[in-house]
Image (cartoon, rainbow, N blue to C red):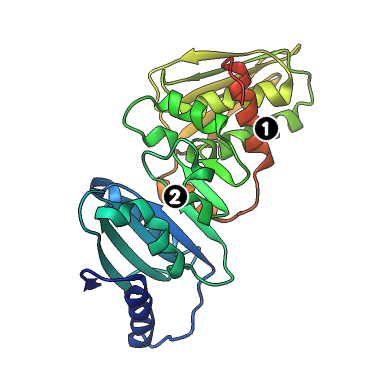
């Protein structure tokens, strides 16, 4: 990594070219730009997650740390490539007046004619699509489960402020659950009369799953509480008996259905790099998340 002190976007871009030349690959093979906005204490972990995701999605990764907005502007950066990265990386620290105009530093560093995604690994702006950095991206990724306080409120706020291109990793965590539940009803094409989701007391993913089931099945869905980890059981009631998927250890689930023996199903809780990689596979609007977000707002008694 090359350290640049009191630098500019032009100098960072020039260092990208020099880094590619030193690596013997002056041609760019990257498919997108990923912007990561994180506080100093979370930046290293977030960049490591992006590093693992870059193996599937070679990208120019721009980590942005917004420091104290008072005083003279300063831009410092660590720039490099290789060392396990699937593309290029820059960790940019902003301080002073330039903090209020972070987009002016980031915009010249975006790959031309390529999609842009932005990820807030912890706290996100109230309206990501209206954030100055968020407006640069076609895909805006938040994580309500990673905020320090008020996870359920953060999830509800993200649903209220939904705009095309928004998503949350709390929704991504539900992909295996949704696939299993859909497959269960394919195997048992029965009318569902009610459902219940049991999970930790505070679980944005469980809140979204309740809204998704309610929206898809058009039935009332009860929310139960357990010790976790995460979601521990989903039960769908039918006239022939309950269909349930229970997971007490966060790894292996048991699938139970009427007139058939129970069977184990792999349902391991996934780490952030895998979730991030999944979200970067599609950069268009997620219609199902949009419908679920609207349903969650409605269930909570609010209006978008």
Q: Is residue 197 left or right of 132 when viewed as pictured?
A: right
Q: Quadrant of residue 234?
A: top right
Please state the horizontal and vertical placement of residue 232, each as a whole percent of the image. Answer: 47, 24
- Can residue 244 be seen here? no
Q: Position of residue 105 (x, y in %)?
A: 38, 63
Position of residue 184 relative to residue 71, above or below, is above
On the picture, is 131 further left or further right than 181? Answer: left
**Earlier-in-chain disc, 1 versus 2:** 2
Is residue 99 toward the left or the right of residue 54 in the image?
A: left
Image quadrant assignment for residue 103 = bottom left
Query: Residue 70, can we see it?
Result: yes
Residue 243 spot, x, y in % from top left? 65, 20
Q: State the count of labels.
A: 2
Q: Residue at x 21, y 58 (%)?
A: 72
Task: Say the numbered circle drawn on residue 119.
Answer: 2
Query: Which residue does the numbered mark 1 point to in the structure image?
Result: 291
Q: Secondary structure at mark 2?
A: strand
Query: In the depicted view, which residue is nearer to us: 32 or 277?
Result: 32
The answer to whether mark 1 and mark 2 are in CB contact below 8 A is: no
Front residue of this view, candidates 230 and 130: 130
Give left or right: position of 11 versus 57.
left
Q: Residue at x 52, y 52 (%)?
A: 135
């Amino acid at each position: 990594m090359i350290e640049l002190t009191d630098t500019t976007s032009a100098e960072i871009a020039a260092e990208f070219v020099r880094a590619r030349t030193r690596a013997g690959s002056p041609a760019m093979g990257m498919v997108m730009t990923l912007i990561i906005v994180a506080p100093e204490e979370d930046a290293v972990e977030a960049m490591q997650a992006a590093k693992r995701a870059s193996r599937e999605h070679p990208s120019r990764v721009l980590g942005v740390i917004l420091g104290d907005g008072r005083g003279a502007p300063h831009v410092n950066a660590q720039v490099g490539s290789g060392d396990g990265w699937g593309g290029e990386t820059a960790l940019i620290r902003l301080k002073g007046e330039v903090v209020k105009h972070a987009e002016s530093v980031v915009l010249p560093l975006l790959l031309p004619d390529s999609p842009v995604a932005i990820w807030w690994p912890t706290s996100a702006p109230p309206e990501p699509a209206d954030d100055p950095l968020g407006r640069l991206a076609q895909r805006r990724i938040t994580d309500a489960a990673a905020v320090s306080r008020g996870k359920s409120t953060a999830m509800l706020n993200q649903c209220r402020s939904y705009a095309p291109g928004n998503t949350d990793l709390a929704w991504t965590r539900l992909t295996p659950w949704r696939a299993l539940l859909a497959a269960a009803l394919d195997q048992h094409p029965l009318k569902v009369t009610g459902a219940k989701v049991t999970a930790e007391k505070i679980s944005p993913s469980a809140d979204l799953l309740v809204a998704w089931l309610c929206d898809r099945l058009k039935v009332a869905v009860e929310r139960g509480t357990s010790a976790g980890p995460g979601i521990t059981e989903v039960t769908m009631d039918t006239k022939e008996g309950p269909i349930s998927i229970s997971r007490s250890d966060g790894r292996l689930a048991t699938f139970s259905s009427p007139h058939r023996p129970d069977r184990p199903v792999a349902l391991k809780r996934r780490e952030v790099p895998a979730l991030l990689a999944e979200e970067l596979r599609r950069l268009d609007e997620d219609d199902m998340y949009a419908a679920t977000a609207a349903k969650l707002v409605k269930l909570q008694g609010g209006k978008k």
